[in-house]
Image (tube, rainbow, N blue to C red):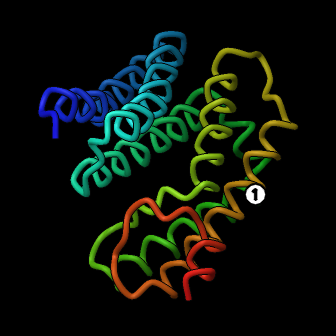
Amino acid sequence: MNSYRYNLVNAITWFRIISFPLLMVLIAVNTIHVFAWVLGLCFLTDLTDGYLARKWRVETEHGTRLDSIGDDLTILAGIAGAWFFKREFLIEQRLIIGTMLLLFMTQTILAFFRYGRITSFHTLLAKSAAILQGTFLILLFFMDSPFLPLFYGAALVTTLELLEEIVLVVLLKEWKTNVKGLYWVLRKR
């Protein structure tokens, strides 16, 4: 394994993790425009690190775990930013958002009981949900009003992805990374 490439991919992932406290500070000092740009950069690095890890064949369990932590912190920062900068929208959509949070908590708790850690399945649905969530959250902070069709699309794909991950946690006895999805798991049985 090429250590330079491996370290570069992990450095890109660490950028997202390290950016989380910065994003919280930007919220606290009420700088929505800088927050939006840094959040956008975090989502861009999410696409970049995974692509490079696969292209350069430097995927590791450690890198996958870091990526999952970076993903969760980036989404958490986006939700925190939405709470402080676009609270009315969150209140209006509380049923949908609450349902997704409940599914996420269910999946996370099940994973901790089953594996002792969070999942890093990185299914195709999870990747699709991340792209939709990231696009929506970035636009949320750059536009005057939320683009609702994108929100509903992201919410639908995210809900399906979380349900798929709950089923995967139940089916997979051992912790695995980079599972394409439920279809592929069932096909191997």
Q: Is residue 39 above or below residue 166?
A: above
> Along the horizontal axis of the image, is 145 left or right of 181?
right
**Residue ID at (77%, 40%):** 151
What percent of the width, then of the height, locates residue 140? 69, 26
> Along the horizontal axis of the image, is 7 left or right of 161?
left
Residue annotated with mark 1? 96
Pick whichever, 101 or 46, lies toward us.
46
> Along the horizontal axis of the image, is 79 left or right of 129?
left
Amino acid type, label 1: Ile
What percent of the width, then of the height, locates residue 16? 34, 32
| Number of other residues with Cα within 10 Å of mark 1, as a class: few under 14, some 14 to 19, many 20 or more | some
Q: Quadrant of residue 147?
A: top right
Q: Is residue 100 above or below residue 53?
A: below
Q: Residue furthest right?
A: 149
Viewer can see residue 102? no
What percent of the width, then of the height, locates residue 22? 31, 24
Q: Is residue 152 above or below residue 96?
A: above
**Residue ID at (80%, 23%):** 145
**Residue ID at (55%, 41%):** 79
What percent of the width, then of the height, locates residue 85? 60, 26
**Residue ID at (53%, 18%):** 36
Q: Quadrant of residue 41?
A: top left
Pick whichever, 60 or 20, lies toward us.
60
- Quadrant of the image containing the N terminus: top left
> Along the horizontal axis of the image, is 22 left or right of 167?
left
Q: Secondary structure at mark 1?
A: helix
- Quadrant of the image containing the C terminus: bottom right
Viewer can see residue 84? yes
**Total count of labels:** 1
